[in-house]
Amino acid sequence: MEHTLTAAMLSAASISLLSFVGCGGGEVTPGAAATVGDVAIYDAYAPASPLNDVGSLYFTIVNRGDAEDTLTAVTIPAGRAQLHEVVTVDDVTRMRPLTLLPIPAHGVLKLAPGGYHVMLSHLGTRLAVGDSLEVKLTLSSAGTIAFKAAVLTYSEVVRRVEESVPRDP
Amino acid sequence: MSRPVPKITRRAILSASSLALLSLFGCGRDAPPRPDELRGTPYNEPLQKPDFILTSSSGGPFSFREDTEGFVTLLFFGYTHCPDVCPIHMANIAAVLSTLPPRVANQVRVVMVTTDPDRDTPERLRQWLDNFNPSFVGLRGSLNEVNDIQQGLGLPPASVYGEGEDYSVGHSARVIAFTLDNRAHVSYPFGTRQTDWAHDLPELVEGKWNTR
């Protein structure tokens, strides 16, 4: 039982997304929050922030191009957004700030609880359920992508996480 | 009239079926858990419930040993500027408690001790925890006190990363479950699934703590 959700979640999500996206490339992408060139954003959400300063943001980037792309910046209208990776070494779990995240050619980058996330801080106001958060990503090849992330209750977020994990037979 | 199966064939059947079982259960797990086995991570030596007093999120003193007597107590060290692991852990436990029968859920106390006393006032802890479950208790002490408690439980001390007002805090993401015998037989790492919590909490409340 000594495992985290992350690896399983990532692989399950990659498989389902890859099968969903297929190998065609270039077709209209159903369900995407935004598409620019070969890159599409899916499953963008932020849990309602417990207080008015700190929050988190998750999304999935699918790259259908033949070349790797790189996520270099995330911006939100008010407050700071910082890419993070959660790492655990010798039972110390901490966040490591990242300056970039690669999205492999014909691959997927999934941000999800316990793995990669965007930490939001200095929000000024609470992110409330039902709101949507305007997000802008900068990618080194695809350029700027703007989309809206749905603000969800934490119970909805953990329900999604639970459902994305493969179950024991 | 069945003939005895020759040894070699029996071995072949056994190894074929073990292979099938292994591939069925995957991930190196040798066998599926028995229903009465807890799914938390067992301690080789159970931990004694520590005896400490910190300031609670309601402002008064909270004696961990006395004020959790008679309850299954889930102890977690974390902080409110933690955007990912801490709120997800709390939300997972809250979600499971809301699905359990009240006779079980009412016997479980959740206590979070802040590893960031500089920023986490009792009021802030209270407001933060209210997002998950108003019955969750937040505790604050000096960093030295909190690190001593963690050390006594075999956990690493809190460690600060980054500079300025936006520092983050490294801490163990393990939830320690103390049972009615005032010991902890199991802990739960980050990533513990709701199905595992939902399986274990009633067992712990009923005083069963057999581990694998």
Image: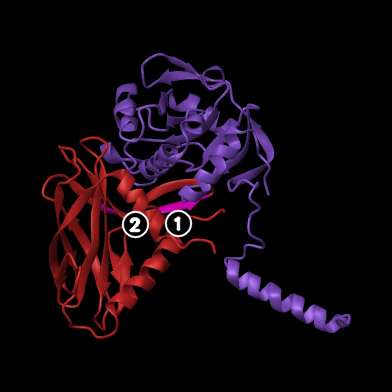
Chain colours: A red, B purple
- Evaluate if marks 2 and 1 touch, with contact meaning CB atoms under 8 Å apart: yes
Q: Quadrant of the N terminus of chain A?
A: bottom right
Write the start and end of the magenta stretch as one range. A82-89
Q: Residue A92: x percent and y percent? A: 49, 45
Mark 2: few, some, or many residues within 10 Å (few <14, many ≥20)?
A: many
Q: Which image quadrant is residue B181 in?
A: top right
Give the label on residue A5, or none: 1
Q: Residue B37: x percent and y percent? A: 65, 47
Q: Residue at x 32, y 30 (%)?
A: B130
| Dominant SS type (magenta) | strand
- Circle 2 — which element? loop
- A50 lies left or right of B78: left
- A111 lies left or right of A52: right
Q: Nearer the viewer, residue A94 or A99?
A: A94
Q: Residue B59: x percent and y percent? A: 36, 16
Q: Nearer the viewer, residue B20 or A142?
A: B20
Residue A85 appears in the picture as rendered: no
Mark 1: few, some, or many residues within 10 Å (few <14, many ≥20)?
A: many
